[in-house]
């Protein structure tokens, strides 16, 4: 159980909040690169409680700047994109990709007024078919080379999940909650087996759960009575590495989360794949009906693992109230994550880098998240079946 204050500390993401400042130390994906087109060169994105516009100017430079115009607040996402940047639709104030104001057209010809305008801007970097940003203090660190993102002996595919209408930390706690797999997912992830009963699901398959901290997060280890061991990490603070992919949870605000899944499909025989352009993207159909309603005014599909997870996370509430929960021994991974969050928040407050930040180019090597072991695990083999066909079609 947490106090109200602890709950706020671990979950809220706006500027100046403890978790929000922690999250601002990491690179976060904001949009699929292919979503910026000639026809639609600007896109409104909400991230960590801030409304921003991602745009590509006619010279091909990409920027991410505050959406609300510094003049009188109209949305720049309706702006006109030109060679020098994006011009506000209302009175034409022109901003470049860094947010510098280049012109205020209705001011007198010799006016230097635009030089006094400070408009917020963040870096935008393209990586594995996504635009990423870093909203923390400069200099920004490097984007870590996790194996799923950096391996060259295969192809990647991006899946965009339906918007999750709850706080990001509910999804992260789920990533260190291995007991739920055998119960919540008993009819979807167990290959058609029949459980002893629906209460226990497949709980009795498990010998034990263990957790240990790694250089980039928490490793979760399930040992089955059959002798099979399944290990995969929570990459701190907002990523689950599971099966053949990473599930990157990006808080839009305190009660909405965007989830990007990047999956890796190895080639046969470890053949290296030369750069082939951006990975293909699939937009996953809604898990809810109606898709934009929240519990209890919506109905979740329960026929897929991810749909079941979204149900569990969202029905805990838009921002789960942890002042009334009853944690049990099987929640020790959740407790560990909260403790690490508190410790890393304290580091950020002291001006230090939190867990997993890579700055030194010499240390910028591929990071082993035990993907190789997962690729041979029973769950991943299932996930790889479709893609090996897709791989031939250029996935
Ligand atoms: S509100 Fe943007 S230029 Fe006036
Ligand atoms: Fe799950």
Image: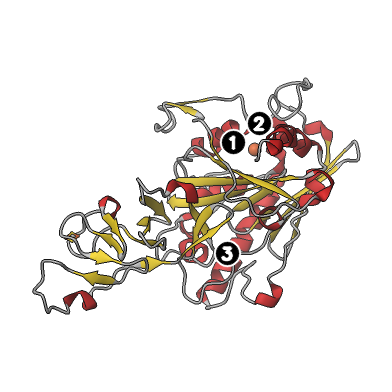
Q: Which mark is residue 284?
A: none
Q: In the rendered image, is residue 176 in sight?
A: no
Q: Mark number for residue 342?
A: 3
Q: How many marks?
A: 3
Disc 2 beta carbon < 8 A from ligand 2?
A: yes
Mark 2 or 1: in front is 1
Give x and y (percent) for residue 332: 70, 51
Image quarter of the C terminus: top right
Separation of disc 1 and disc 3 at Cα?
Answer: 25 Å
Q: Quadrant of residue 102?
A: bottom left
**Closer to us: 134 or 221:** 134
Give the foreground label among 2 and 3.
2
Q: Position of residue 71 (x, y in %)?
A: 18, 64
Where on the picture, by quarter, is residue 93? bottom left
Whether label 1 lies within 8 Å of ligand 2 gets the answer yes
Q: Secondary structure at mark 2?
A: helix
As drawn, 280 above or below 41: above
| Residues at marks 2 and 3 touching, judged by CB atoms closer than 8 Å | no
Q: Which of the pair 98/160 is nearer the observer?
A: 98
Residue furthest to the right: 227
């Amino acid at each position: 159980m947490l106090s109200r204050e602890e709950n706020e500390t671990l979950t809220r993401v706006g500027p100046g909040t403890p978790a929000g400042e922690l999250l601002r130390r990491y690179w976060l994906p904001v949009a699929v690169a292919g979503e910026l087109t000639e026809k639609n060169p600007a896109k409104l994105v909400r991230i960590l409680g801030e409304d921003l516009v991602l745009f590509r100017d006619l010279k091909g430079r990409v920027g991410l700047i505050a959406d609300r115009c510094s003049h009188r607040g109209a949305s720049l996402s309706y702006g006109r994109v030109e060679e020098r940047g994006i011009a506000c639709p209302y009175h034409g104030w022109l901003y470049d990709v860094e947010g510098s104001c280049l012109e205020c057209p209705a001011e007198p010809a010799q006016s230097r007024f635009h030089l006094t305008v400070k408009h917020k801007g963040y870096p935008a970097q393209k990586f594995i078919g996504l635009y990423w940003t870093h909203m923390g203090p400069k200099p920004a660190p490097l984007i870590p080379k996790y194996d799923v993102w950096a391996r060259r002996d295969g192809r990647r595919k991006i899946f965009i999940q339906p918007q999750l209408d709850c706080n990001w930390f509910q999804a992260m706690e789920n990533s260190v909650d291995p007991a739920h797999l055998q119960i919540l997912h008993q009819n979807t992830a167990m290959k058609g087996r029949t459980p002893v009963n629906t209460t226990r699901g497949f709980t009795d398959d498990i010998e034990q759960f263990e957790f240990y901290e790694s250089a980039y997060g928490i490793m979760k280890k399930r040992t089955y009575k059959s002798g099979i061991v399944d290990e995969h990490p929570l990459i701190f603070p907002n990523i689950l590495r599971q099966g053949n992919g990473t599930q990157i949870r990006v808080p839009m605000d305190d009660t909405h989360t965007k989830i990007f899944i990047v999956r890796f499909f190895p080639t046969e025989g470890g053949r290296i794949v030369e750069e082939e352009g951006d990975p293909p993207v699939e937009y996953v159909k809604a898990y809810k009906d109606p898709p934009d309603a929240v519990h209890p005014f919506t109905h979740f599909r329960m026929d897929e693992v991810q749909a079941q997870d979204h149900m569990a996370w969202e029905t805990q509430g838009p921002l789960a109230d942890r002042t009334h929960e009853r944690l049990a021994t099987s929640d020790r991974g959740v407790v560990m994550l909260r403790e690490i969050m508190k410790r890393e928040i304290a580091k950020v407050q002291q001006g230090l880098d939190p867990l997993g930040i890579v700055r030194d180019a010499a240390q910028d090597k591929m990071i082993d998240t035990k993907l190789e072991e997962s690729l041979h695990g029973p769950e991943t083999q299932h996930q790889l079946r479709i893609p090996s066909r897709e791989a031939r079609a250029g996935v």
